[in-house]
Image (cartoon, rainbow, N blue to C red):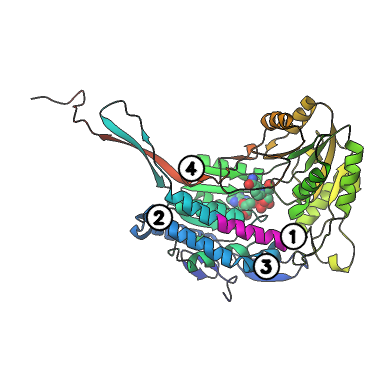
Amino acid sequence: MAGWADEILVGGQWRRGCGPLIESVDPATGAVVHRFHGAGLEDVDAAVAAGLAAAQDPAWRNLLAHQRAAVLRRIGTEIEASADLISAVQTADTGKVRAETRALAMSAAGTFVYTAAALETMEEPVTPARGGYLTMGAHEPYGVVAAITPWNSPIASEAQKVAPALAAGNAVVLKSPLWAPCVSLLLGRICQEAGLPAGLLSVLPGSGAVVGDALVRHPQVGKVSFTGGTTTGRSIGRAAADKVMPVTLELGGKSPTIVFPDADREQALAGILFGIFSSSGQSCIAGSRVFVHESIYDDFVSQLVQRTRALRVGPGDDPESQVGPLVHRDHRDKVRAMVERAKSEGAQVLCGGSSPEGEGYATGAYYLPTVLAGVANTDWICREEIFGPVAVVLPFGTEADLVAQANDSEYGLACGIWTADYRRAWRIAQAVQAGTVWINTYKQFSISTPFSGHKNSGLGTEKGREGIKSYMRQKSIYWETAGSPLPWAEHE
Ligand code: NAD
């Protein structure tokens, strides 16, 4: 795959992008790993036109479900076979530790294989008729789908869109992010090598404001599936409304994770650390608001801080590292500025609150896992998504107080509950406004389980068997069967 990151994939052709230069920087060292021309507006038009032609080509459009599924399955197999390469590329692109990037690659492989199975077994309903006819549902592809992804979990979040959109019979134009552009190009190569017909997948790394916006507004793009920040999602939703175009929006979060006094202490500590500090906190479902019952607050928080201090921060390709650098120095600086502002307004830094010192960290985008206390749930630091390795700890008293605080957020993405009382876990799981609730676990994912955000965390659902239909428009067919005349039929 020599030179795979020098060109972008436009309508089946690898070529130099029409947009400005993109630099993929290794956040562990600050070194430029790849430099290439990203996509520009001409690439958008070419990718959409080629996608439309490929989606309408009978060679793809008329494939039976099991035949299209076979292509998806091959892509899954190829991704799995390339997992080590994908993991290495992604670690260099994003700084994530190798264990995480390998898991993301395997998750992407699983998504293609699962989607193939879901496609082969997808059924259309025959609905109860109220006359002499048969009524049935039919689902058709939109044509060209734009998939717009963030930098934090590339390949996995891209597979989550590309696999079901292709399964549904669409072509996909993937707009990958500036800070993690390489792995999406690798995905493009793999899809091609697995036999996906040309034009069905274009990969356009580039600017959101230019390339992403042009895709959203393009008259021939029939659906947008977006994962990213709530502000961007809102503006995409507005543009989609003008076209009366369906969108799926997977957006930000500020998720509560809740510790009751009867929780298994070891399990809760490990789960909370993993929930906020894995991926260096750059995770939409990061458990960034840690609510601890007041009766155990001091003791639990002191253990949490002790273990946070013990986390091993280092480059993603060192197997000893648990917390890698942040994706980019600009992002690290943004996280640092948020912590500094909170400090200046009275937040107590229990640990972290700075970049690690030492030669090995000097040029990287590192920030120490940080625990803040002495803040109220109504303070901005508890309301805004930091998207970095920063947790706030907050005490709570009664269950009612806890639920009120947990829900007092514009977001509703995820929630963690740590308790031995299964009735309490059930009550809280129902009362908390969140698309995903984990009980005595955190950040576990199955492709068969639907994923969605409540409130400002999103619109629409990804994953699960119904995921394919979210990339199709519904049609109803009435098929006369009884030979009975309609009321105005003329009689001799
Ligand atoms: P972002 O919103 O800045 O960018 C996401 C993508 O949108 C990028 O590819 C970007 O180039 C593109 N984009 C930006 N402006 C655009 C525009 N006007 N039109 C079209 N596309 C545009 O987000 P980010 O900083 O890359 O990612 C972090 C955010 O993503 C966090 O808020 C995180 O919570 C969220 N996220 C959500 C989920 C989820 O499933 N809910 C998963 C991962 C990340």
Quadrant of the rendered image containing residue 398: top right
Give how far across and how far down residue 152 sits, in percent.
68, 55
Local secondary structure at mark 1: loop
Residue at position x 62%, y 60% in the image: 105
Task: Please state, as top left, top right, bottom left or bottom right, where the C terminus lies in the image.
Answer: top left
Residue linked to disc 2: 66
- Magenta-highlighted stretch: main secondary structure? helix
Residue that mark 4 sits on: 245
- Cα separation, mark 1 vs mark 3, equals 17 Å
Q: Which residue is mark 3?
A: 88
Q: Amino acid at mark 4?
A: Met
Tell me, yes or no, whether the highlighted magenta stretch contains residue 255: no
Q: Quadrant of residue 478?
A: top left
The crowding category of the residue bearing disc 1, from other C-alpha atoms within 10 Å (few below 14, some 14 to 19, many at least 20), is: many
Q: Which residues are magenta?
A: 97-110
Secondary element under disc 4, as helix, strand or loop, is loop
Residue 235: x and y in percent read: 60, 43
Residues packed near mark 3 inside 10 Å, few (<14), some (14 to 19) or many (20 plus): some
Up-down relation of residue 132 to residue 181 (above or below): above
Question: Which residue position holds label 1?
Answer: 328
